[in-house]
Amino acid sequence: MMYEQNGRRATRREPMRAQGVYSASKLAAFEHVKRLPNRWAAMLPCIIAGPGRGGLFVPFARSIARFGTAVYPGEGGHPVHTVHVEDAASLLVRVVERRATGIFNAASPSPLSIDQWVDVIAADLG
């Protein structure tokens, strides 16, 4: 959420831009860390998914199972990266073990839109 949400693969070359209070607070904390005198590393995950992290997905699944539809605001066509919690944790362990510094993005290779997630959930539910 620190990178401009433009649907492209998140890299260091992408602009970091606040898009609301949540991302503004993350960017402010990141800027503070960068000014510290010690070595630093920052893992920047996108949406973290995994057991217990239902978020939007649980209500979508319930609505699709019960009514055969899902309702969400907007067109739902903006692609967003996700990362599984175990993959994010593995990256964090590697960064710490190697005493690495810099920025480490944790994102899926291909982002999906909410509209695409609804289709995946609907297919899984039959």
Image (cartoon, rainbow, N blue to C red):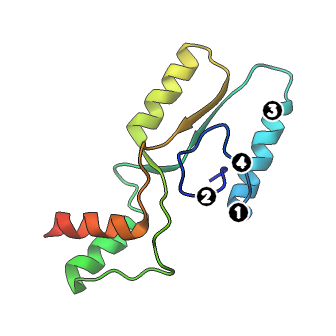
View extreme (bottom): residue: 67
Q: Is residue 121 left or right of residue 80?
A: left
Q: Is residue 31 left or right of residue 94?
A: right
Of the residues tagged 4 and 3, which is closer to the observer? 4
Residue bearing the label numbered 1: 19
* Amino acid type, residue under disc 3 in the picture: Lys
Question: Quadrant location of the C terminus?
Answer: bottom left
* Amino acid type, residue under disc 4 in the picture: Pro
Q: Residues within 10 Å of mark 4 (few under 14, many from 20)?
A: few
Q: Which disc, if any, is residue 15? A: 4
Q: Secondary structure at mark 2?
A: loop
Q: CA distance from mark 4 to mark 3?
A: 16 Å
Residue 84 image position (x, y, % from top left): 39, 43
* Amino acid type, residue under disc 1 in the picture: Gln
Query: Mark 1 or mark 2, which has the lower sequence index?
Result: 2
Q: Secondary structure at mark 1?
A: loop
Q: Secondary structure at mark 3?
A: helix
Of the residues tagged 4 and 1, which is closer to the observer? 4
